[in-house]
Image (tube, grey):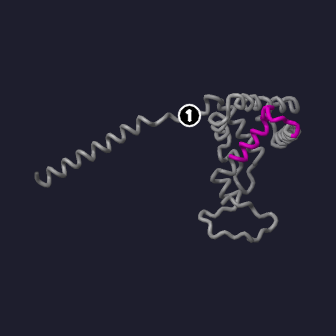
Amino acid sequence: MNRREAIERVALIMGGTVIGAEFFLSGCVTAPKNYNELFSNDQVALMDEIGDTIIPATKTPGAKAIGIGKFMAFMVKDCYNDKNQAIFTDGLTKVNDACKKKYNADFMACTPAQRTEVLNALDAEQKAYTKTKKKEDPNHYFRMLKELTLLGYFTSKEGCTQALRYVPVPGKYDGNLPYKKGDKAWAT
């Protein structure tokens, strides 16, 4: 066997390995889950607006800017059981119902001040419910909305790096780091 034949055979073996691996791995890929199986685009837009009312844009981006509606839809679909999914989706309707009752308009049609007032009332309602809630009682929909908003925002790139103090590679541990009132919390 000469050098040229050896190179051709090695190339054939290696090429077969690469092609075979690609074929094998492509058979293992699952299709990405679509949040629209559980939520409509209007509901995702509503979740964006609810999230942006909870964490509005200031010097840092708001919850809507990070796509909090898609995050919530993804988390509810993949992480909540059927019972909590139903509570959450019914809760979106209840948010709109609360706006209609108070302002005769959907949440999306209300002003930012009206949205804040409705969400503050729902937050007070969920706090009272949580105080008296038994372990077997279902979760309150607004608490789920608020917790997912906070989780999604503060684990996003924007939330970690702009709303919190962030050091990509932290140095040594300093348990006596000076803190001034008004300093951001640490993300790392």
Residue at (83, 42) in percent of width and height: 116
Q: Position of residue 177 (x, y in %)?
A: 73, 70
Q: Position of residue 128 (x, y in %)?
A: 89, 39
Left or right of residue 137: residue 48: left
> Is residue 47 shown to the viewer in this render?
yes
Residue at (68, 53) in percent of width and height: 159
Q: Residue 45's image quarter?
A: top right
Note whether 13 is above or below 32 in the view shown: below
Instruction: List the single residue furthest toward the front.
Output: 135
Residue at (19, 47) in percent of width and height: 9
Q: Nearer the viewer, residue 181 or 132?
A: 132
Q: Find disc 1 in the rendering and name its residue.
A: 33
Q: Position of residue 24 (x, y in %)?
A: 37, 38
Q: Nearer the viewer, residue 115 or 14?
A: 14
Q: Residue 108's image quarter?
A: top right
Instruction: List the single residue furthest toward the left.
Output: 1
Quarter containing the C terminus: bottom right
Q: Nearer the viewer, residue 103 or 183?
A: 183
Q: Nearer the viewer, residue 135 or 164?
A: 135
How many numbered badges does the structure rendering display?
Answer: 1
Report helix, strand or loop for mark 1.
loop
Magenta highlight: main SS: helix
Residue at (11, 53) in percent of width and height: 2
Give yes or no for residue 141 being in the magenta stretch.
yes
Mark 1 surroundings: few (<14), some (14-19) or many (≥20) residues within 10 A = few
Left or right of residue 101: residue 186: left
Q: Position of residue 114 (x, y in %)?
A: 85, 39
Give yes or no for residue 126 being in the magenta stretch.
no
* Residue stretch rendered in magenta on the structure: 131-151
**Amino acid type of disc 1?**
Lys
> Is residue 106 shown to the viewer in this render?
no
